[in-house]
Amino acid sequence: MDFNMKKLASDAGIFFTRAVQFTEEKFGQAEKTELDANFENLLARADSTKNWTERILRQTEVLLQPNPSARVEEFLYEKLDRKVPSRVTNGELLAQYMAEAASELGPTTPYGQTLIQVSEAEKRLGAAERDFIHAASISFLTPLRNFLEGDWKTISKERRLLQNRRLDLDACKARLKKAKAAEAKATCEGDTVPDFQETRPRNYILSASASATLDDTSHPPPRAEWKERHPEGWKTPCFFLLPLTPSVTQARGCLSLPEDRKLWNDEVDKAEQELRVAQTEFDRQAEVTRLLLEGISSTHVNHLRCLHEFVKSQTTYYAQCYRHMLDLQKQLGSSQGAIFPGTFVGTTEPAAPPLSSSSPTNTVATMPVVPSVASMAPPGEAALCLEEVAPPASGTRKARVLYDYEAADSSELALLADELITVYSLPGMDPDWLIGERGNKKGKVPVTYLELLS
């Protein structure tokens, strides 16, 4: 494997420098460019959206698939880009067990026949559950995953890039500040040679021979000793200037003051140029990140639409379950009337509420249609005529209406929530219905909308 050592060393140096800068900012020892309040609000809003989307996604997966091992298996199949195998639902598995039990215990016995009827209903419930899981996965889970794996990764990448641009900008600001401070110090001290260690290394020093010569001339020996050491007389020393990087030392007065000021001016100009470039890159990256963060509003709109689709599919699923169980209850009640005493006149417990009770219109639109007495009557049997029906001498009871109900035809009685009516049953009547009276009005009413009072 081919490694680029220069790039690796450069990346390591940048990482170390930024780590030091982060630490200094944490302790308040370095300057930090603050973002505006609107930008900070966008960042907080994006983080909240990401966190709650993850939680809702995980809990929805638990709702659709309570088995943890099955969820792990599906996750692995998705990561391997393989099709998830079809899995039998709990309702379908229960239906299979009941059917096998009926075949072994005797399908002609009352218990075996009931097992077969319940297994058929459970099978339909399992199929409805499979359809609900499929619809919810497509319309709700997939958009949430696409946001977390697509849009959010892009936002995170641009935010990290913006953070790096901010660190570069702060470093340029600090470098310019030090250069200006050192320039001002050199100007005030006059002939004092400036120290370039606080800025970018860009200075010159003397060679070793020139430095030794300066040492000799700075502390001249006595005249007799000097003549003895230099019989040939005085010679002008030759100074050689060498560039120094990265460490810098003082030049011991070998440079003139105008030259020092010129070097400092060049250093300040270069720092200002780098600051302008860093500021431009930071502003450009901040604008890109801002546009992505403002797109979170569109994400909310998309998730809102998906949430409506999820509620719609869940409503359809529960309506199918209610209809299947109501049909099963009728089958079992017709074959053995004492199995479900909660649907007859003698009970005082309210039945399960309908799917919608906000208004009569919504109730009719979403409630499964309950067959009327005439439609459930055996062939050849005349329909019930309400005008000829007289209340029995005994057996009438008071009932409180639980939900609004709009009559489907003239044989039914419209109900309003919380009103009190008189109800009674007739021989041969469907146990899911009663005859209700309110004043001079009479009609069939569903038992599931009533609470029979003692």
Image (cartoon, grey):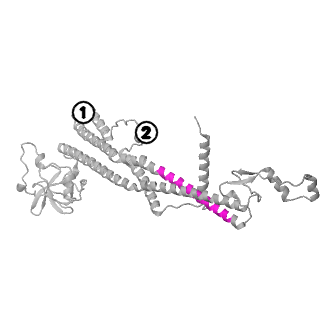
Q: Earlier in the sequence, mark 1 or mark 2?
A: 2
What amino acid is at disc 2?
A: Lys
| Residue 143: image location, x then y, percent | 36, 47
**Dot 2 crowding, Cα within 10 Å, few <14, some 14–19, many 20+:** few
Q: Residue 361 lies in what quarter of the image?
A: bottom left
Q: CA distance from mark 1 to mark 2?
A: 47 Å
Assess whether residue 177 is covered by the magenta stretch.
yes
Quadrant assignment for the C terminus: bottom left
Q: Residues within 10 Å of mark 1 (few under 14, many from 20)?
A: some
Left/right of residue 228 with respect to residue 411 in the rendered view: right
Label at residue 79: 2
Q: Residue at x 53, y 54 (%)?
A: 165
Query: For mark 1, what is the residue?
Result: 106
> For the residue labelled by badge 2, is the local secondary structure a helix, a strand or a loop?
helix
The location of residue 194, given as percent across then percent down, is 71, 61
Residue 39 percent coordinates (x, y): 46, 60
Residue sitting at the far top: 104
Residue, x 71% and y 51% (percent of image)? 244
Image quadrant in which the N terminus is located: top right
User: Visible in this render: residue 26?
Assistant: no
Q: Is residue 1 left or right of residue 443?
A: right
The amino acid pointed to by label 1 is Gly
Which residue is at 11% across, 56% downward? 443
Could you say which quadrant of the image residue 408 lies in? bottom left
**Residue 272 visible here:** yes
Residue 38 location in percent, x, y? 45, 62
The magenta stretch spans residue 195 = no
- Tell me which segment is drawn in magenta: 156-185
Q: Which mark is residue 144?
A: none
Magenta region's main secondary structure? helix
